[in-house]
Image (spheres, rainbow, N blue to C red):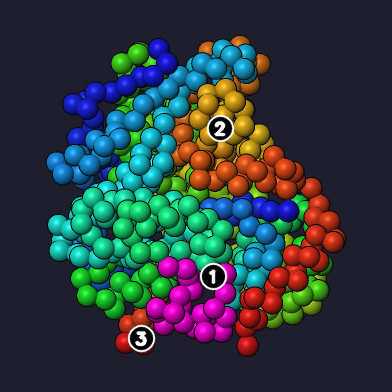
Amino acid sequence: MEVYCVKIGMLMEIDYCVAMNEGLPCQDFIRCWGKRMDVVAFLEERFSQEELKKAFCSRPKSRMERIIDTLNMTKKHG
Amino acid sequence: MKKILLSEKDMPRAWYNIQADLPNPLPPPLNPATGEPITPDMLASIFPMNLIEQEVSPERWVEIPEEVMEKLLMWRPTPLYRAYNLERFLNTPARIYFKNEGTSPPGSHKPNTAIPQAYYNREFGTKRLTTETGAGQWGSALSFACNQFGLELKIYMVRVSYNQKPYRKIMMEVWGGKCVPSPSGDTNAGRKYYEQNPEHPGSLGIAISEAIEDAVTSKDTKYSLGSVLNHVLMHQTIIGLEAQKQLETIGEYPDIVIGCAGGGSNFAGISFPFVRDKIHGREVRIVACEPASCPTMTKGPYVYDFGDTAETTPLLPMHSIGHAFVPAPIHAGGLRYHGMAPLVSRVLVDGLIEARAYNQLETFEAGLIFARTEGFIPAPETDHAIACVIEEAKRAKEEGKERVILVNWSGHGIIDLAAYDAYLSGRLEDSTLPKEELERLIKNLEKFPRPR
């Protein structure tokens, strides 16, 4: 069973969505899979509260913020 | 008349910059590290100054350079079709027109900005471009454009897509672009993941980091982006400007303008010239369509709420707009929608457009109806707009109104047939995921190292 991923632009399976964020779920995981399963139970079974906070409690970055973040990082590491 | 064609001499000679007409100007993007506005100087290491000037330009019309016109003429002006067969199938009094952007060499609207970006880079002295691509639409469009202007191109393609979508990669290579799977071993950003696991499936975030690092650290190299930015949306307005002229030749004006919205560029392309009319008093409804599975515009950002300050209650998924938990920056400078172009977010917040969400199954069903009436197979994202067209055409029938509907048919789906196969074979059910299926999929997780 697959879902159309608006970020990548193609159909993706759940194993990608649940771990693509450095081993943590995609920030859109709940939205994309919420109708098909009990996402809260599913996530809590696999991740600690700390991991879930890390995955979901930060504000999603806009594309420009991501670009500037990367620029800052690249400059910092020379 | 089935096809409304515009002669080459009548092709628009300037792009429309909506920033000149916005009732509320766009707030500048902020540097996340400092909270200060991002200055043109900061962007100069990745974009050429002539494109940065366009990004911040207040000019209403920006002339299209002659050399860009010559390249756009390879497939533009694109035809506007009257969808007679779809109208008959729906038995609707609505008159449906679709602007076929699938006629470009890569098969989508994307080269409308890839061509000018390659041109301005070459004029600036850039020899090489880098970019990232998800499923490959943007990568193939930019590869085509770089080939036309003699630029080298390196594309970081999310590995999971690189492995599953070989035809897009081949397109990029046919036009001379170098396409590598991301994470790659070529950058610090990629090596971090690649050395842990050479089969790491990647993400768009990693691919963006790789492309930017490459641009900043390589000689005569800049970075190119196919959505979100103001100048990208401006380059796409040629779609709506042509459509206005085409409709004028047959004495029509749309009651409703429809486009699908992922990053916002094709939607902006068809709609911004009509948003301008609306700002100046014309009556027209403009609808952006998005997936119900990821409704950033219709439902806002989504965050986990820990329920109370002690963070002891179970996790509750919730839509965040209007809720006290929402971090302050989301509200700063007006609402912004995750992944959406700031200009599209702005016109949505200002009430100039509306947003609607469609379920996965109804979009593919709409795509199939379209393919079986009008013949052309739409790209899966285009299916969202077609679902909206069908909804509006049915409404016109119920209300007995002869509405004129204009839709941007943003690209063909010939290279996305796997998605239609998934739909036709029942793998896209919106129903509950069976336990066995879930367990089978979760077994694949070993390929993602957990954070230490």
In the rendered structure, the residue with mark 2 lies on which chain? B
* Location of the N terminus of chain B (image quadrant): top left
**Which residue bears the numbered disc 3?**
A76
| Quadrant in the picture for residue B433 | bottom right
Residue B373 location (% of width, % of height): 57, 22
Q: Is residue B54 magenta?
A: no
User: Foreground mark, 3 or 2?
Assistant: 2
Q: Rounded to the nearest whole Å, what is the CA distance between mark 2 and mark 1?
A: 31 Å
Note whether B215 is above or below B12 in the view shown: below
Note whether A70 is above or below B76 in the view shown: below
- Which residue is at 85% across, 61% downward? B435
Note whether B283 is above or below B190 in the view shown: above
Start and end of the magenta stretch? B180-206
Residue A72 location (% of width, % of height): 36, 79
Residue B360 location (% of width, % of height): 66, 43
Same-chain status of marks 2 and 1: yes
Mark 3: amino acid: Lys
**How many numbered markers are drawn?**
3
- Number of the label disc, if any, that sits on residue B272: none
In the rendered structure, the residue with mark 1 lies on which chain? B
> Is there any visible trace of residue B90 in the rendered image?
yes
- Are circles 2 and 1 on residues that touch, CB within 8 Å? no
Helix, strand or loop status at disc 1: loop
- Which residue is at 45% across, 75% downward? B184
Q: Report the side of B349 relative to A78 (left or right).
A: right
Q: Rounded to the nearest whole Å, what is the CA distance between mark 3 and mark 2?
A: 46 Å
**Which residue bears the numbered disc 2?**
B386
Mark 1 nearby-residue class (10 Å; few <14, some 14–19, many ≥20): many
